Image: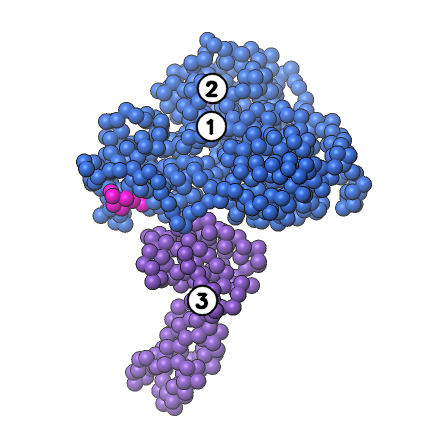
Chain colours: A purple, B blue
Amino acid sequence: MRHILSVLIENEAGALSRVTGLFSARGYNIDSLTVQTTEDPTLSRMTIVTHGSDDVIEQITKQLNKLIEVVKVIDLNEADHIERELMLIKVRATGKDRDEMKRMADIFRGRVIDVTEKTYTIELTGPGDKLDAFIKAIDATSILETVRTGASGIARGERVLKI
Amino acid sequence: MEHISGAEIVTRCLQAEGVEFVFGYPGGAVLEIYDAIFRQEQFKHVLVRHEQAAVHAADAYSRSSDKIGVALVTSGPGATNALTGIATAYMDSIPMVVISGQVGTSAIGLDAFQEVDMVGCSRPIVKHNFLVKDVRDLAATFKKAFHIAKTGRPGPVVIDVPKDVTINKCAFEYPETLSIRSYNPPTKGHPGQIKKAAQLLAEAKRPYIYVGGGAVQGGAGAQVTELVKLLGVPCTNTLMGLGALDGTDPNFLGMLGMHGTYEANLAMQYCDVLIAVGARFDDRVISVPSQFLSNPKRIVHIDVDPSSIAKRVKVDVPIVGDVKHVLTDLIAALKEGNLRPNPDALANWWKQINEWRKPNSLLYTPSDELIKPQSVVQKLWEITHGEAIVTSDVGQHQMWAAQYYKFRRPKQWINSGGLGTMGFGLPAAMGAQLANPDAVVACITGEGSIQMNIQELSTCKQYNTPVKVLSLNNRYLGMVRQWQEFFYGTRYSHSYMDALPDFVKIAEAYGHVGFKIENPADVEPVLREAFSPALKDRLVFMDFRTDPSENVFPMVQNGKGLNQMDLPPHMHGLQQVPFENNRDYGNLC
């Protein structure tokens, strides 16, 4: 099953490689991983999307906690949560497809953030499946380039991940 | 405040930590540190002949004492040579600090001479590691490193120190305290869980205590013994746990696992309540989890490392905490509630265990012509009164040492259990002897393993470590040969060692005493001589020419259950299942 783990980790050189090294050394999956410093510059917040049986997810959580630099780990799937991903997608936009592409972007609440005579670059945010749906909805041959950030997640309501 | 160099800070930190010995080997990147060592007298430096040995010696120094071993190596090849030793310590959770030199910070990443990314190379095999880029961070890093190494589940910590950091100067003050917000190892176990464990023990019909290296490292030998005595229950130790309960204790069933005794393994399979203490249900102990769990049992698992719990086997009562604390509380809970297993059921359980004990699965056929390796270990036990610190290498001799030397106390048995590192024994004996100058230290090895670090005979001479080396020389890589005999149609592919050296001459060339023993009748006299006061201060190398066809029994083959052992010839045909359809094992008790 797919899980989203949120990790608070010391913002130190090499900390990221400890996390990724752990996943590869123990044969765990990383579907996506995002990381950035938090409002407290000594801390980074990581969102790791992974999948595995409950036992594997339990081990991943424990192994992450065992890393000296990891301050806290929560499994967002344990309660309601929100996840968002950002995609930048460059598409061919010529002739009659140009209007159609703009309409599709609007439907998905995307924004065209760069324009040339032949292309649009569209910014789209949402849960991963919405981005997948957009890719499916447009003509595959019109896609020139996609770049996705991977999911960032946060708990709903008053639940917070803090030290 | 006076400003001193990073190199001097390194030595001052080691002094502040009460370090007695640093095992190391100099080189370009650590010359400043070596110069600082030259100018101080508080701790001694032991010059090994290969960096791997430095780390093994530091490791065994920790294993055989309550102190922390320290190794010092240079950058590049010095660092990579240390890796096997670091991994060895990591797999067995041994506290240790390894200082590696590094090229100057401005040269890092430029493929400089003797540059290797030590932090990257060692990352998967350390508890933690540091690259110190600023001399002002050195002292705090050392404080953290020692703290992390010895607390919680112990392990090796690497400090990588670039050369310019050892040259740069700053004020020095060793921090008295520290706090690492992201690192708070547990101590006390959860009282509710401890109560549950006590309750389970009281309900048990076939209780069993399974003790691993965590009890040895966690200093919980006394608590294990008290628990066993209080309840009168049977107990087994893993390879790493040997000595946690006295090997001569009547409640001790011997080591369990791949080469465990018949009774220890069957009790593990058929117990109904299992208390696991600082042990991790690894593959060499329980083999396949599904086989192990095919006879239902309720399991209490006490471990300081939460990730050890429910890793291979699901348990009913997990207790995260320092084993010493948890056992103390468990004993108190049992006493307070006057909780004991049902005496009739327990008596029946012992009756069954004593049946299993009767055939003596460690029996072997003595010989007048060939030296039986087991007999050498037994004689060693007699002659050293079971009091020696014994190190070993890896292979058949290691298993025989574990089976036949009845370890009396924790930290008496020093071996590479997790990683299985050949070449560990001799440098480990050196480290153990330096940590315990008055102890008798014996290294049980084989002609294969000893040659992986034989150069340390030279270090032993230089530092007068009078260890006694017992090489069980069967001319084969014995354990490989055994597997080839069992599983590869006796095709002994590259497990025979031709062109062996004359080990007596080698020992003598290094300035030691050497004996070659070919006749079973000579085993005892030579051992007596080697351990006599006359040779007390000498390293004695004993080259025992042993029976090359001897195998280690019992044996649980890969993929088999603990009740499917290959047994020694005198036990062939013995039923390993107490009842057919033993799911309803309740009849027994």
| Farthest residue, direction front | B336
Which x, y percent locates residue B19?
A: 35, 30
Q: Residue at x 40, y 63 (%)?
A: A34
Are discs 3 and 2 both within one chain? no
Residue B64 is tagged as: 1
- The three-letter amino acid code for the residue at tag 3 is Gly
In the image, B232: left or right of A30?
right
**Could you say whether the residue bearing mark 1 is in a helix, strand or loop?**
loop
Q: Are marks 3 and 2 in contact (CB under 8 Å)?
A: no
Residue that label 3 marks: A153
Badge 2 amino acid: Ala
The residues tagged by marks 1 and 3 sit, at their Cα atoms, a distance apart of: 48 Å
Picture quarter with the C terminus of chain B: top right
Examine the structure image and report whether residue B134 is included in the region drawn in magenta: yes
Tell me residue B332's x, y (percent). Answer: 60, 36
Q: Are marks 2 and 1 in contact (CB under 8 Å)?
A: yes
Chain of the residue on which disc 2 is drawn: B
Which chain does tag 3 point to?
A
Q: Residue at x 28, y 24 (%)?
A: B41
Q: CA distance from mark 2 to mark 1?
A: 10 Å
| Residue B143 pos. (x, y %) | 34, 39
Amino acid type, mark 1: Ser
Q: Which mark is residue B526?
A: none
Residues at discs 1 and 3 in contact (Cβ within 8 Å): no
Residue B28 in the image: above or below residue A115: above
10 Å crowding of disc 1: few (<14), some (14-19), many (20+): many
Q: Which residue position holds label 2?
A: B439
Neighbor class of circle 2 (other Cα within 10 Å; few <14, some 14-19, many 20+) is some
Q: Residue at x 44, y 85 (%)?
A: A107
- Give the extent of the magenta segment: B131-137
Determine the residue located farthest toward the left in the rendered image.
Answer: B2
